[in-house]
Amino acid sequence: MASSLRSVRLTLSQYKSPRVTSHASNLLTSTTPRLSPSRQLPFNRALATLHGGQIQASLVEVTPSKDPRTPPPPSTLVFGHTFTDHMLAIPWHVEGGWGTPKIQPYAPLPLSPSATVFHYAHCLFEGLKAYRDPSGKVTLFRPDMNMKRMNTSAERVAMPTFNGDAVIELMKQLIRLDKHWIPEQPGYSLYIRPTMIGTQPALGIAPPKEALLFVICSPVGPYYPQGFKPVALYGTTEYTRASHGGIGAYKLGANYAAGVAAQKAAAQQGYVQNLWLHGPEHHITEVGTMNAFVAFKRDNGVTELVTPPLDGIILPGVTRDSVLALARDHAAGVLKIPELTDKLVVSERPVTMKEVKAAAQSGELVEFFGVGTAAVVSPVDRIGYLGEDLLIPTGPDGMGPLSRPLWKYLTGIQTGAIVHPWSIEV
């Protein structure tokens, strides 16, 4: 017993502070397929038990890449196709919890063909961005919201939860290591993709006993490099994105895979993206993979900004929450957003295609747009619905009277032009 305790103490003493190792990572650098993820993802049960099975940012091991690459010219970047030199990986095991965090060279994952992610869709992820301001300071936008949602998604598919603050600290270390990948030109950023997958090599529908949380980074350019271009949507009645009690409110891989066929069908009919409708009354839910906003003219010159409520089938988007908070503060007089009307009412309520169609025909429809991390704001100029196209008003620049000032203010916060507590320095 004394010998065992001494062994545990020696193990713990090796991990008291972050260190840089020159040896190749045990986790991701193997080029030979292995059958047991337990061996691929080294897990120190003694250490995990002593720190309560929780992620400890102070124990991170950093292995710099031996072959760092030169970032490509910003003008050649395609969203999600280029990745930085390093990644973060943290294994988990049901018997001990979270293992040692590792920041190491970006490389393929060696997984067993029987890993649960391949068979039962044990996969969830997040998306956020790091921005560089003119002074060189790098910031993250509301990462706490992404960690909160990621934990909620993990709970929904019986996967392990984690300390979000610890993962944010580890992401900061990863970004500091690869911050030179963030282009200096305006409008560019570093897209951050935290992901969790089930890695247990076993068939059978049950909570996975092994998992991997990893984070990769991708430099990206402006979503609309040539200026805003409104998109045409197809009001999808043939497919259903989500139902009450299902997984629509969670950022799971299964949600996105099921939407690809609908998006493909919309494209074949000449539309850029599909508009998800729900139920016999065709309630508006989401715009492709974005949250939907609609603006209506009301009496006495008032404009109502509407987004569907979080009723269990809509993803609680971080950009959605940000737009709502800014618009409400402006409407209440707490905040002044330049160019945004003072006669504004903000509503979270159900909205149907029948209401949108009637407003478009009567001239009471002000604008329609989607919001999300990738595009921030995506204006809409046309909706195909039940065999006809509804034309949506847009301004000369492709945006509308609400989306334009909200986008300007929100991106001002993200890029550091406007000081705000949502912007977290790396």
Image (cartoon, grey):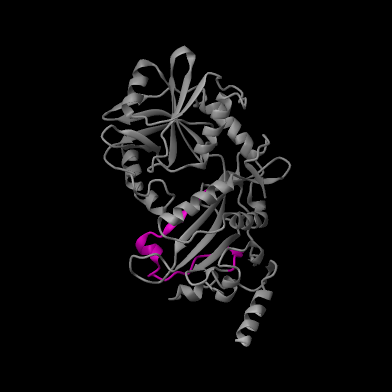
Q: Which residues are magenta?
A: 100-127
| Residue 115 is one of the magenta-drawn residues | yes
Give the answer, above or below, for where 243 lies relative to 197.
above
- The picture places residue 327, in percent across and down from the top left corner, at 54, 29
Of all residues, the one furthest to the front in this rendering is 1
Q: Is residue 99 left or right of residue 352?
A: right
Q: Between residues 261 and 138, which one lies in front from this camera angle?
A: 138
Q: Quadrant of residue 292?
A: top left
Give the answer, above or below, for where 242 lies relative to 201.
above
Which residue is rendered at x = 57% and y = 73% of the image?
26
- The picture places residue 233, in percent across and down from the top left corner, at 37, 33
Which residue is rendered at x = 59% and y = 21% of the image?
339
- Picture quarter with the N terminus: bottom right
Give the answer, above or below, for where 204 lies relative to 353.
below
Q: Between residues 27 and 232, which one lies in front from this camera angle?
A: 27
- The picture places residue 288, in percent across and down from the top left corner, at 40, 40
Total residue callouts: 0
- The picture places residue 334, in percent across and down from the top left corner, at 62, 27
Which residue is rendered at x = 51% and y = 67% of the image?
92
Q: Quadrant of residue 158?
A: bottom left
| Residue 108 is one of the magenta-drawn residues | yes
Of all residues, the one furthest to the top in this rendering is 300
Residue 31 in view (yes/no): no
Residue 285 in view (yes/no): yes
Give the answer, above or below, for where 36 lies relative to 231.
below
Q: Is residue 334 left or right of residue 285?
A: right
